[in-house]
Image (cartoon, coloured by chain):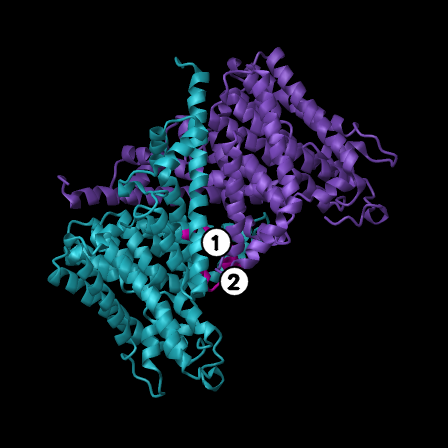
Chain colours: A cyan, B purple
């Protein structure tokens, strides 16, 4: 080397100090904000995921500029850059540069959180539940996927002249119900084991599957040269086969997985084996042209048949609590909420789009509550409201769409409004409707179904 | 934008596909290799950490070139680049570029694993044990730190003319005993609750603290303009105060931490609260010019006094099993073992250095076994051997030194030989020596000390 290695070292060390301060500091800011807002939401009896989103908005591009994905092209908060610069003997501009360069590290961790979350969702899918309420849940799920998707895509494309790919993407973001939010409200009000509760949970499991299949197809589509039928059919077939294979393997391959784990003796066997299935399925999905996220979900589905499924869930949960939070907060940081300012005339159309999406998202799922045939009298409003919250699955669409650069800021904000609106309204409306009801889980014929 | 956004998209999507395949594939390769070698080591009754290192060597720069840190300046395996290129419609050269660009993501995850491991080490430090065998353990620890450090640094600098900073670094890498390896051998042979066992565990806790303080000082030193007394004293004082504050807080602040957690109601409360302490301490350490790793350890020490310490340990373990493995495997991938080829005359001196370090590392810790005064007859050879394995702490030095670019390839390989040698020999020799012994934990007055 021609340069003095010690001098190089000095620069290197300052850089390392700044990198460490930035990466550790990012986690600090994200978790302090997310936790504070999550605690607030819990106290307001609202889903914590809303807190994580709001936290992201507060610390992100629309707020304090503390966590700034490079895609936003915004300027890192001046005092923060100065503060880190002082601690690492660098200028604020140098800190800003290192910040942008190292931001992908945080995004990689967020992506890991997304995979862990989808893996956990797959693991927790109790496929037997689906069979028990089979036909009704299937009808509800399919109606609740098809209606918002068709109305949303067609409306955006024909009424608002949004190009086809982003319109499909936004339509797809409205398809999947968040199981977690509905299940927690039902559980809290002791409605989980009623026929309505079982139908909604079964339908939500199924529309997770449908939604993620659609996601895998749409993301791949968005990369193509336009909308032609052959690749779409090919992708839908591939995604369908992939999920069918996972469902088949959850019955057949899980014992082989259990046998393998029994052979392992080094510490950390279960978590590593689970992680290998997860990454293996992600790789397989991506290799055949689908989204890796579908692979993560399929990996969870496969292991849901394992007798160690519970144990794996416990091991994955800390990963989800940490890294999926980063994913959701980052979505919030990315949002440009200034496009929602109603006093800016240029924003009016965007606001109308947001109102349109929210309406379609609500109406589409409510209608699903009236879509099935049942001899027993059931409360169809409860089923419709139960299907309403989009929560994390809608956000996953939004996050991936933003990262892929498919959406305009106005459409991103409109999807965010749709997700926040449905997620916010569903528990409130459900509590109002259910509060007057007897609930009466003891009298229900389905009460003995394990949940 | 002047460019066609759709065209941009296509490139973007191919890039994303390649990135996902690379990052998911990296995990697959790392965990398949690490798990296979760890299982082999368990069956040979050797520490699994050796397996992770060997796995890294096999898949890294000295082996198959599948996992290649950019620092090695080696060429990614041709068939791998071709394979990923085919799947993502890119050329092998483009894949190689994306590989190098995204490698820091993996290193960031490995760094997170390092912090989690040190946090766990701090959490598991049972400070009461240290008090129970107080004086003897302290003498053993200090002797076992001072002797290898002094002999190693002086020998490298004066005999082998290694510059002072790398010599100090290599000396420091010999200071800390790996608690895990000794504890598992002692536990397996039912020797953990003997006086020898307690002395070694107590001394190992203490020399972890000393070792990490030395690490914090040496890394900061390496960044300075040379070796002058004032900054060294300042750093030693800062590091000492930092650890003293952590020890003090573990007695006083842990109840406040428990109280805070009791107030939290959103899911994931314990793991997020623990993570906030971890990142907060890392930030604080780095902000006052010490290594963030010391902060992680100190964070663990603080929470070791919490009544949720066990629960936090359980939550952190999956993180360690996954991400610390990445850290250790990456160390192996970085190593250039060709410098150990004895048939290359230029390597002779490096090999002599390696033999010297290994000898000093063994002799220094064995001598510690004879350093204390005891009225009860104890087996000093067992204590000396128990202090011998360097395991993960030696590797942490090596990993950080390599990343900071302080060490030459020959010195890196010599430290690796020292770590592998002591870690490999200690359990074998301990089993030989202890096999003939009665063990007799029931008769020992210290048997009731909780472990």
Check the residue under mark 1 and report the chain it is in. A
Element on which disc 2 rests: helix
In this picture, is B366 found above or below A27? above
Question: What residue is rendered at 30% in x and 51% in y?
Answer: A400
In this picture, is B412 found above or below A451? above
Magenta-colored segment: predominant secondary structure:
helix
Q: CB of mark 1 within 8 Å of CB of mark 2?
A: no
Question: What residue is rendered at 40% in x and 39% in y?
Answer: B105
Answer few, some or many: residues within 10 Å of disc 1's Cα (few below 14, many 20 plus, some between 14 and 19). many
State whether residue A137 appears in this view: yes
Residue B313 in percent (x, y) is at 59, 50
Q: Nearer the viewer, residue A225 or A100?
A: A100
Q: Which of B33 and A414 is in front in this view?
A: A414
| Quarter holding residue A68 | top left
Residue B43 in percent (x, y) is at 62, 44
State whether residue B351 appears in this view: no
- Residue highlighted by disc 1: A274
| Quarter holding residue B376 | top right
Observer-side mark, 1 or 2, equals 2
- Residue highlighted by disc 2: A310
Magenta extent: A303-325
Cα separation between marks 1 and 2: 12 Å
Residue B231 in percent (x, y) is at 56, 20
Check the residue under mark 2 and report the chain it is in. A
Question: What residue is rendered at 22% in x and 70% in y?
Answer: A147
Element on which disc 1 rests: helix
In this picture, is B269 found above or below B101? below
Residue A324 in percent (x, y) is at 41, 53
Answer few, some or many: residues within 10 Å of disc 2's Cα (few below 14, many 20 plus, some between 14 and 19). some
Magenta segment includes B191: no
Q: Which of B67 and A83 is in front in this view?
A: A83
Do marks 1 and 2 share a chain?
A: yes
């Amino acid at each position: 080397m021609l340069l003095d290695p010690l001098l190089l070292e000095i620069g290197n060390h300052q850089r390392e100090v700044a990198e460490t301060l930035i990466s550790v500091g990012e986690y600090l800011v994200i978790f302090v904000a997310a936790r504070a807002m999550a605690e607030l939401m819990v106290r307001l009896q609202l889903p914590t995921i809303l807190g994580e989103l709001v936290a992201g908005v507060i610390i992100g591009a629309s707020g304090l500029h503390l966590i700034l994905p490079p895609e936003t092209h915004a300027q890192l908060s001046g005092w923060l850059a100065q503060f880190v610069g002082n601690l690492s003997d660098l200028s604020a501009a140098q800190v800003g540069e290192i910040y942008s360069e190292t931001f992908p590290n945080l995004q990689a961790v967020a992506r890991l959180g997304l995979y862990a979350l989808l893996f956990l969702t797959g693991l927790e899918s109790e496929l037997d539940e689906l069979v028990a309420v089979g036909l009704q849940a299937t009808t509800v799920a399919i109606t609740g996927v098809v209606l918002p998707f068709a109305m949303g895509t067609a409306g955006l494309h024909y009424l608002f002249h949004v190009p086809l790919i982003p319109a499909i993407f936004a339509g797809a973001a409205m398809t999947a119900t968040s199981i977690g939010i509905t299940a927690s409200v039902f559980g809290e009000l002791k409605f989980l084991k009623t026929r309505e509760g079982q139908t909604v949970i079964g339908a939500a499991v199924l529309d997770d599957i449908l939604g993620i299949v659609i996601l895998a197809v749409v993301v791949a589509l968005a990369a193509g040269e336009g909308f032609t039928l052959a690749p779409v059919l090919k992708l839908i077939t591939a995604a369908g086969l992939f999920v069918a294979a996972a469902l088949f393997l959850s019955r057949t391959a899980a014992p082989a997985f259990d046998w393998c784990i029994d052979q392992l003796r080094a510490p950390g066997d279960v978590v590593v084996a689970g992680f290998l299935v997860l990454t293996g399925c992600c790789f397989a999905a991506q290799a055949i042209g689908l989204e890796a996220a579908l692979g993560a979900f399929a990996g969870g589905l496969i292991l849901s048949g394992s007798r160690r499924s519970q144990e794996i869930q416990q091991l994955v949960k800390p990963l989800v609590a940490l890294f999926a939070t980063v994913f959701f907060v980052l979505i919030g940081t990315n949002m440009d909420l200034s496009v929602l300012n109603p006093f800016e005339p240029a924003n009016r159309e965007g606001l109308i789009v947001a109102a349109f999406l929210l309406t379609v998202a609500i109406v589409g799922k409510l209608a699903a509550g009236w879509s099935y045939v049942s001899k027993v009298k059931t409360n169809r409003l409860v089923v419709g409201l139960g299907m309403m919250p989009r929560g994390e699955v809608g956000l996953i669409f939004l996050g991936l769409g933003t990262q892929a650069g498919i959406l305009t800021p106005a459409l991103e904000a409109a999807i965010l409004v749709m997700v926040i609106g449905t997620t916010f309204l569903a528990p409130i409306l459900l509590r109002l409707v259910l509060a007057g009801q007897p609930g009466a889980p003891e009298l229900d014929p389905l009460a003995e179904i394990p949940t």
